Image (cartoon, rainbow, N blue to C red):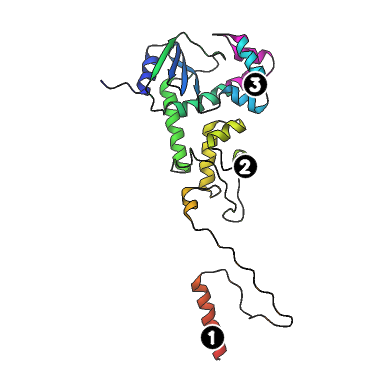
C-alpha cells in the first residue's frame, strides 16, 4: 500500500479538526487548531524570530527570553505586544508572511515521513488562521508567478552572481532587488540571502528570478556566452596627420563592408 501524500495528510487532519503539530521529517512543522493551520515552520526559511531579529526590533537574546517566559502552549506573541516590541498588526503581518513563506517551501516537500503530536502548540500562540485548501492554492499561485518571472529552477539553489555590465542604458529596481544586488557575493543562494537580509525566502527567490529576466544576474545562458575580448586602444595619431575621414562604426561586418564599398566608389569619381 502506497504511503499517503503530504497533501492527503494535511487534508485529513483538517477534516478531523485536529489540534496539534505535524512534524514533516526534519524539514518543518505545521501547527493546527481545530483543523485550521495557525502557523508553519520550515528549516529553509526565516520564521517570525528571524524576520524580527534581522529587522532589529528584538535581539536574539530578547527573543529567547520571550520564548522561555511564554512556556509550552503560551502566548509569546502577546508578550511581545505587551512589551511594545511590535504592535498587534505587525505581529499578525509577521505571522502571515512567515507562514505563507514556510508553507511554499515545506508543502512542496517530497518527504512523506510525518508525525502528529496531539495538543502541541507554537510558543507564539495563535494569531492567524489558514484553511488547508486555501493554503495549497496560494502555494500553487506563487509557483505559477515564479514560472512567469523566469521559467527555470536553475537559480533557486545557486549562488547569486550579479553581472558586471547591464543591458541597455539603465535599469529600474525594486528596493529588495537593489538590496540583493548589494548583498550578493557569488557564494550565497537566494534563501541564504533572505536570512542575511531578514526577508521572506519566497520574495527573495522571486526577486532573483526577476533580476535574471532583466539580465542583471548570472544564469546558465549568460555563463555559456563567450567572454568579450577587450579592444586594443587605437594608436595615437602623428602630429599634423589627418585621419582616414571614415566614421568609426561599432557595427557588424555588413556595415563595415558597405562603408568600404562607398569609399571605393567615391575614390573612382
Q: Which of 171 and 122 is in front in this view?
A: 122
Label 3: state its secondary structure. Answer: helix
Mark 1 and mark 3 in contact? Answer it, CB < 8 Å: no
Residue at the bottom extreme of this rendering = 269
Q: In this view, does 115 lie above or below 167?
A: above
Residue at the left extreme of this rendering = 1
Q: Residue 264 carries which label?
A: 1
Does 87 lie within the magenta span?
Answer: yes
Q: Nearer the viewer, mark 2 or mark 3?
A: 3
Position in image of residue 86 (x %, y %) = 66, 20
For the C terminus, the image quarter is bottom right
Mark 2 and mark 3 in contact? Answer it, CB < 8 Å: no
Q: Which mark is residue 145?
A: none
Q: How far apart, in angstroms, are the residues tagged by discs 2 and 3?
A: 26 Å
Mark 3 or mark 1, which is nearer the start of the sequence? 3
Mark 2 or mark 1, which is nearer the start of the sequence? 2
Label 2: state its secondary structure. Answer: helix
Q: How far apart, in angstroms, are the residues tagged by discs 1 and 3?
A: 77 Å
Q: Mark 3 points at which residue?
A: 60
Position in image of residue 228 (x %, y %) = 54, 60
Does 46 lie within the magenta span?
Answer: no
Label 1: state its secondary structure. Answer: helix
Amino acid at each position: 500500500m502506497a504511503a499517503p501524500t503530504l497533501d492527503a495528510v494535511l487534508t485529513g487532519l483538517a477534516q478531523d479538526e485536529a489540534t496539534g503539530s505535524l512534524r514533516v521529517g526534519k524539514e518543518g512543522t505545521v501547527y493546527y487548531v481545530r483543523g485550521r493551520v495557525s502557523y508553519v515552520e520550515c528549516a529553509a526559511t526565516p520564521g517570525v524570530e528571524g524576520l524580527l531579529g534581522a529587522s532589529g526590533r528584538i535581539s536574539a537574546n530578547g527573543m529567547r527570553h520571550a520564548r522561555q517566559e511564554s512556556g509550552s502552549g503560551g502566548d509569546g506573541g502577546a508578550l511581545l505586544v505587551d512589551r511594545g516590541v511590535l504592535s498587534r498588526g505587525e505581529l499578525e503581518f509577521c505571522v502571515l508572511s512567515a507562514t505563507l513563506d514556510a508553507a511554499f517551501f515545506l508543502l512542496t516537500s517530497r518527504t512523506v515521513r510525518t508525525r502528529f503530536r496531539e495538543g502541541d502548540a507554537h510558543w507564539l500562540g495563535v494569531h492567524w488562521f489558514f484553511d488547508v485548501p486555501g493554503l495549497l492554492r496560494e502555494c500553487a499561485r506563487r509557483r505559477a508567478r515564479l514560472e512567469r518571472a523566469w521559467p527555470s529552477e536553475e537559480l533557486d539553489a545557486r549562488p547569486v552572481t550579479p553581472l558586471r555590465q547591464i543591458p541597455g542604458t539603465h535599469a529600474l529596481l525594486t528596493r529588495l532587488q537593489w538590496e540583493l544586488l548589494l548583498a550578493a557575493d557569488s557564494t550565497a543562494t537566494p534563501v541564504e540571502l533572505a536570512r542575511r537580509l531578514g526577508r521572506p525566502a519566497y520574495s527573495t527567490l522571486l526577486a532573483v528570478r526577476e533580476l535574471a529576466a532583466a539580465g542583471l544576474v548570472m544564469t546558465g545562458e549568460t555563463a555559456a556566452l563567450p567572454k568579450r575580448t577587450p579592444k586594443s586602444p587605437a594608436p595615437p595619431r602623428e602630429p599634423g596627420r589627418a585621419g582616414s575621414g571614415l566614421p568609426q562604426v561599432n557595427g557588424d561586418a555588413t556595415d563595415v563592408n558597405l562603408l568600404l564599398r562607398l569609399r571605393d566608389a567615391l575614390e573612382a569619381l
